[in-house]
Image (cartoon, helix red, strand yellow):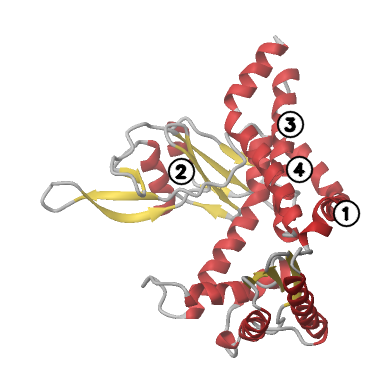
Amino acid sequence: LAIYKIVVFIVERASQIADFISSVVDSVADIVSGAIGAAANRIEKALIQALALIIDLLARIIGLSGIAQTIKSLIKKVQDKVEKAIDFVIAKVVQTVKKLFGKVTGKEKNKSEDPEVQKRWTEGMKAVRELVTHSQKDPYNDKEIKTSLDKIKTKFKFKTLSPTLSGREWRVHALMNPEDDVIVKAEAKRPPELEGKSTPNLDKLEKEHEEGAALRYVEGYKNYKGTKYKDIVTYVEHRAARKLGRIKEKPGLAAYAAAGGATSSKNTKTIEILRRSPKGTGYTVQRQRIPDFFSEGTIVGDVKDVKTQSLDEQMRDNIRITKADRVRVRGQADIITAKCRFDLVVRAPKDSTQEGTHVSDNLKAAIAASGGQIYEVL
C-alpha cells in the first residue's frame, strides 16, 4: 500500500517535483555565474517546494490530516534559524565554487599566448580595477559606468566590456582573448528620474526585500514601448506592487500545498474574461485576471489575506473559470472548455483577539458547488 501511495504521489506531483529539480539546478548555475541574489531566491523557492512535497508524501503514507496549523506554527518558530542556516550554506557553497572555478579555469582564462594582447589585457584590467577601487567610496550610476567602460574598451581594444546591474553592483564582463568578470559598486542613491516623486510601493520593496529595484525599473521604463503606463511613477509603482504581492503570496501557497492543496507554484498565466461581440461573431475581452494558482481543467484559486471576502467581481470571475464560461488563456485562440474547482486560501483564526477571514455565505456556496474548498492557513 505504501508503494502504491508513493507511485500515486509521484504521478500527481510530477510537475512540482520537476519545478523543484529545476530550482536546484538553476541555483547552482547562478552561484557559478556570481548571481548570488538570484541564487538565494532560487534556494528559498526550492526549500519551500521541497517542504510542501515532503509533508504531502508523509501525510499520504501515514494518513495524516488537518496538520496545516501545526506545521505553520512550527515553521514560524524555526524561521529565523532556517534563514541563518540558508545564509551560512550559501556563503559556504559560494566559497567552495569560487575556489573550484578558480582552480579549473582561473589561470588559462586570464592569459593570452600573444604578448601584445596580454599587455593590453593587463593594462586594461588595471584600469577596470581602478574603477572598482573608486566605486568603494563613490558608487557609479549607469551613465557613469558606461561612459568610463567605453573609454577603456576603446583605448585597450577590448572585444567586450559590458556592465550588467545586479542589485546594487555592476558585474563587468571583460573579453579580449583572456576573459574575466569584475564587480563594481553601483550608485546607491535614488535614480534622478524619481527624485522628489512619491513611490511608496517601490520604497517598501527596496527597504525590505530587493535593493536596486529602482535602478532596474527605471531602466525598464526607458525600454518600455507600450501605452499602458502614463508616466514613470505609474510604471515603477505597478511593478513594485506586483512584486510585493508575489512575495506576500509565497507563504500562503506553501501553506496551501502543505494542507493538501493542488500546488505551491505561483501562476503566471493571464485569463481573459470574455463577452460575445455585439454582432454575435466571436468574443471581445471584458477583463483580465491572473489567479494565484491555475491549472486548466483542474484548479483555479486565490490567496486572500483579508478580514472579509465577499463574492465580488474577482471571485465571480474565478467562478466563471470553474464553469469554463467564456474564458480563455491569453495568447490562445480557443476558449477554455474544461471545468475545474475553485480553492480559496484565507486567514486562520490565531487566538481570541484575532479572527480568521470571514467568507460570505454566497461565496462559500459557490466554492462548494465547484467542488473546491476554503483553506484557513494564513
Vertical relation: 285 (above or below) 341? below
The earlier-in-sequence mark between 3 and 1 is 3
- Picture coordinates of residue 44 (x, y %)? 73, 49
Numbered badge on residue 55 = 3
User: Which element is circle 2 on?
Assistant: helix
| Residue assigned mark 2 | 363
Numbered badge on residue 347: none
Pointer 1: what residue? Answer: 99
Position of 123 relative to 90 (above/below) = below
Identify the secondary structure beneath mark 3. Answer: helix
Q: Disc 4 residue type?
A: Lys
Query: Which residue has dot 4 on it?
Result: 72
Which amino acid type is shown beneath numbered disc 3?
Answer: Ile
User: Spatial distance from mark 4 to mark 3, Cα to Cα?
Assistant: 12 Å
- Mark 1 and mark 4 lie on one chain; the one further toward the N terminus is 4
Q: Is residue 138 visible?
A: yes
Residue at the farthest left position? 279
- Number of callouts: 4
Vertically, is 297 above or below 327? above
Q: Position of residue 127 (x, y in %)?
A: 77, 82
In x, y percent, where is residue 50?
72, 37
Q: Nearer the viewer, mark 4 or mark 2?
A: 4
Instruction: Find residue 204 and report its image quarter.
Output: bottom right
Amino acid type of the residue tagged 2 in the rendering: Leu
Do the residues under discs 4 and 3 have CB atoms within 8 angstroms? Answer: no
CA separation in Å, label 3 and label 1: 36 Å
